[in-house]
Amino acid sequence: MAENNAKDTQTVPNQAPSPLDASVLKSVPKAIMAGRFAYWSLGVAMAVWASLVPFAKNRLAVNEAELGMLLLCLGLGATISMPFAGAMTAKFGCRAMQCAGIPLYYLALFGLSFMPTPLMQGICLTFFGIMSGSLDVAMNIQIAYLEQVSQRRLMANLHAMYMIGVATGAGGMAVLLNLTASPVLADAVLCLLNIAGLLVFQGHFFPKRTFENKEKTPLIVVPKGLVFWLGFICFFVYMIEGVLMDWSALFMHEIRSVPLSEASLGYAIFAVTMTCGRLTGDRIASLFGTKKLLFYGLSASVLCFLAIALVPYVPLIFFFFFLLGVCASNAVPMLFTLVTRNTVGSLDNSIAGVSLLGYLGLLSGPAIMGFVAHSFGLVYVFVTMAFFLACVAFLFTRLKLKE
């Protein structure tokens, strides 16, 4: 596999292999398993928090507007941490960031199940977001280095583990809540299980950076050059999932008259096919190339969004949700792979910057589409997304990127 994929992997400019590489190469299979656990764990935590939201609303006696303000704390925390996470990972290493960050992440998650006041919940949720953003950056940096050392494509497969973690966390909470009827106890069980998993994998995270960078990593990330434009594209690619998560069910119910009990089926189909697509994405990219896979995926996604908006037949709409999941599944991991191969300077810095712009797209996309829906109607949410993706697909063709 390494020989087949070696031609697809290039050393990052301004970064030379260090003496650590030989020893790290021997432990790559275990490091990949540790990376899978980290992504899976991040997904589990997000699903657990989603399950806790209704309980938090009742416990804190807040209305929908106040709950919305609390939910912004998660995005605020992630946005605060991501500009600094690249420098922190460069200084302390992927292993230290994850071995310290995952327990703190789950400690914050446990606190979210019983905080007694909205203020305390907001503070805890902000800290949860800070750890989420930091871990997201550290994990992507580790996989970028793993791809370089092993000369294998790994980004899509490991991003798929996040989606599997989301499904695992949601299912686990459903089972535990049915057995215990206590969100605090259910949360505690899943937190302890994930911390126990960390004890198994902690020794297999990279102990420090795999490549020595001649350029000092700044404290705050400011993406530049090709990295900025890849981050700009990432903003809109991340927006796909946020928009579908928040607006697809409402569109299906109000515009296509699908019962509320079935309205979320479109997003569920999208999420499942996206996960399956990422599990096979690395192999497909090895056959056709990263740039081709990303460009054609974006272009086909434009047609899928237009079809969802304009086709009146519900079964066909669900089919286009399926196709959209297939087409968009590997856009994010392929973007990160391109960042790895087109970085000049600090790779830690570049991954952090692109992660930040992508996360901003995930958070702001649904809000932007809220204005579109209010001004023009729900159909134009999907038409506008098609327009955005057509623009970034065209932009992508203008960038001179190394494969």
Image: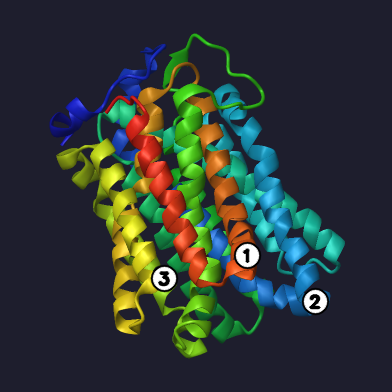
Query: Mark 2 or mark 1: which comes first in sequence?
Result: 2
Label number found at residue 309: 3
Front residue of this view, candidates 50 and 232: 232
Left-right relation of 110 to 346: right
Q: CA distance from mark 2 to mark 1?
A: 19 Å
Left-right relation of 21 to 38: left
Q: Secondary structure at mark 3?
A: helix
Q: Residue furthest front?
A: 376
Q: Position of residue 2 (x, y in %)?
A: 18, 32
Front residue of this view, candidates 294 and 51: 294
Residue type of the residue flagged with mark 2? Asn
Q: Is residue 173 above or below residue 28?
A: below
Residue that numbered label 1 is attached to: 370
Q: Secondary structure at mark 2?
A: loop
Residue 34 can be seen in this image: no
Residue that numbered label 2 is attached to: 63
Crowding around mark 2 (Cα neighbors within 10 Å: few <14, some 14 to 19, many 20+) is few
Residue type of the residue flagged with mark 3? Ala
